[in-house]
Amino acid sequence: MSYISEVIEMTERKNPGEPEFMQTVREVLGTLAPAVEQNEEVLRKNCILERMVEPDRQIIFRVPWTDDKGVNHVNRGFRVQFNNAIGPYKGGLRFQPNVNLSVMKFLAFEQTFKNSLTGLPMGGGKGGSDFDPAGKSDAEIMRFCYSFMMELYRHIGPDVDVPAGDMGVGAREIGYLFGAYKKIRGAYENGVLTGKGLSFGGSLIRPEATGYGATYFFKEVLEHLGDSIEGKTFCLSGFGNVAWGAALKIDALGGKVVTLSGPDGYIYDPDGVKGEKIDYMLEMRASGRNVVKDYADKYGCEFVAGKKPWGNVAADVYMPCAMQNEIRIEDAKAMVANGIKYLNEVSNMPTTNEALTYLQANGVIVAPSKAVNAGGVAVSGLEMSQNSGRLAWTEKEVDDKLQFIMKGIHSQIISALSAYGMDYNLVAGANLAGFKKVADAMIAQGLN
């Protein structure tokens, strides 16, 4: 049995009932064979793969809070600090009913590789709660955030672990969390959270950063292949900050977004999501209704209930911006039948392993999420730099740095593929490039 197979089998035994985590472990380790075969002796000696799939720390805690009617509730909070070989733990907080330990571990594991690719000194972590902010009042969300931080504060700090926002955790939640942390600690540790408001240490273009970065990365992919974004049609899922940022940048570069989606279904707008329609995405998100049908009602376009656009709408590029595992094998088959050439994964692990294998086997260029959506954490890293240096960079300065980072990620992938004599497999290249930096740091720091 190979070293990789041994570690996957060991990890499965130690993590029963954690499908999301095991899915990403199998996907990542399954692409590392070229690096492992060339360096197996030193990797085995230092237990690199065994240590890399085992989180440094898994924290689970209760979060009691009271709603506006005086009824008490208890939710579960999580923080998984996966690997800090190259810097403090860094990764978002997600408030959604489907949050559990498996989801947190998969996201933190992915974050380790993603943060490595940015070139910034950040380790991998992730956290959140099964609390659902939808339909809650500001006062209820504030009380929940204060209770959540009463435990989380023990485990974070500017040089220890720096959380950010993720799904269900936007500027409002980050503001409440920072206020609670500041109150508990009795100190203004500005770098402890990122995604803050501009009035207290946040960075320009942070809300747009993941969508911008995803588009910048895909621009590099197309240029490598002698192509461009101009004139191409894009199917997006979601309609939050990520999809909004992507729509803004795709439109600016001459592409056309034709779909958005929500929990209720998807809209198809053949005229394109542009101008005031992009602005309306923010209104939909701020409404708290979490339905995309409002867009169809306002602009008179098609709405399809209960489905995602994958395989149902013809386009040049698919860009999932919503959830993990939203593209399954049946969607992949429909995509290939529709002649889709490019899948640019913006959300974390949006494609099941079976669907990913099928797409690649049928010639679809897949740009993996750990590279594509690194723009969000990259600008979070830039926010940390601004906080530590008491700086406030202009929008152009941040955007230029973001473009440089995304271009550098693509270059790292090309270099990794070249080093192992591999074809243009972006999934394998991203894993190999991210792995090398983390593994080198772990070896240099000894067994700990």
Image (cartoon, rainbow, N blue to C red):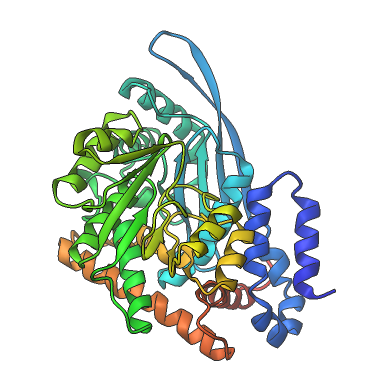
What residue is rendered at 49% in x and 60% in y?
335
For the question of whether residue 208 can be seen, the reply is: no
Q: Is residue 426 above or below residue 368?
A: below
Q: Is residue 408 above or below residue 242?
A: below
Q: Nearer the viewer, residue 240 or 308?
A: 308
Q: Report x, y in % for residue 279.
A: 18, 45
Q: Nearer the viewer, residue 223 or 374?
A: 223
Q: Is residue 329 left or right of residue 216?
A: right
Q: Nearer the viewer, residue 215 or 35?
A: 215
Q: Nearer the viewer, residue 343 or 243?
A: 343
Q: Is residue 35 above or below residue 333?
A: below
Q: Is residue 326 above or below residue 246?
A: above
- Position of the C terminus by quadrant: bottom right
What residue is rendered at 49% in x and 66% in y?
368
Question: Which corner quadrant of the image does residue 395 belong to?
Answer: bottom left
What residue is rendered at 37% in x and 83% in y?
224
Q: Report x, y in % for residue 412.
A: 45, 80
